[in-house]
Each structure stands twice: as structure tokens, then as C-alpha cells.
Image: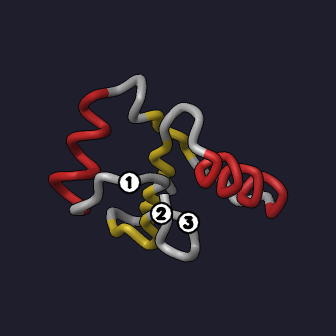
């Protein structure tokens, strides 16, 4: 599982905290640090907002659970 985030995003922080508390393994990729990740989220998943949660190559969540982000 990969979670694409950006620096200072409260929705991202909440998702990361939730996954850690639940013991779900993930890799975080910060789109503020990696331009390629920002481009990948837009090109592959059609998203310019984060968090983007990807499981087995499929985006299972974009934004927070209410679609904000």
C-alpha cells in the first residue's frame, strides 16, 4: 500500500495516524518532496488532491473519507 501525501496536509496526517493505529503497513510518498509523485497522482489516478491511497496499483481513496483534500 502506498499513501501519497503533501507537507502540512491535515487530511494526510489523519490517514497516516489511522493506518499506524490500525497496524496497516504502508509506504508514504510526499508529493511536496517528489515532483514525480505529484505528476503520477495526476496522470495515473486523475487527482490533484491528497491523500491518494493506492493498493495493488488501484487508487482506493482520493482525499479524505469525504473526498476533501
What is the basis of the colouring in this image?
A: secondary structure
**Helix or strand or loop: what does disc 1 sit on?**
loop
Residue identifier under label 2: 63
Marks 3 and 1, how far apart in space? 9 Å
Q: In this view, does 17 lie above or below 22?
A: above
Distance between mark 2 and mark 1 Cα atoms: 6 Å
Dot 3 and dot 2 residues touching (CB under 8 Å): yes
Q: Which residue is drawn at 70% across and 54% down?
A: 14
Residue 51 is left or right of residue 9, and the answer is: left
Residue placed at 28% from the left, 58% from the top?
47
Determine whether the residue tagged by mark 3 lies in a helix, strand or loop. loop
Residue nearer the viewer, 54 or 50? 50
* Mark 2 burial class by Cα count in 10 Å: few <14, some 14-19, many 20+: some
In this image, 39 relative to 9: left or right? left
Q: Residue 64 carries which label?
A: 3
CA neighbours of label 1 inside 10 A, class few (<14), some (14 to 19), many (20+): some
The residue identified by callout 1 is 49
Q: Do the residues labelled 2 and 1 touch (CB within 8 Å)?
A: yes
Q: In which quarter of the image is residue 22?
A: bottom right
Q: Where is residue 4 in the image (x, y as percent from the top left)?
A: 45, 46
Q: Give the x, y percent position of residue 64.
A: 55, 66
First in sequence: mark 2 or mark 1?
1
Q: Which residue is drawn at 24% across and 32% down?
A: 36
Amino acid at each position: 500500500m502506498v499513501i501519497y501525501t503533501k507537507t502540512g496536509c491535515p487530511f494526510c496526517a489523519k490517514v497516516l495516524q489511522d493506518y499506524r493505529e490500525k497496524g496497516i503497513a504502508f509506504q508514504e510518498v510526499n508529493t511536496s518532496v517528489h515532483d514525480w509523485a505529484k505528476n503520477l497522482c495526476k496522470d495515473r489516478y486523475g487527482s490533484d488532491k491528497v491523500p491518494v491511497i493506492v493498493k495493488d496499483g488501484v487508487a482506493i481513496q482520493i482525499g479524505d473519507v469525504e473526498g476533501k483534500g
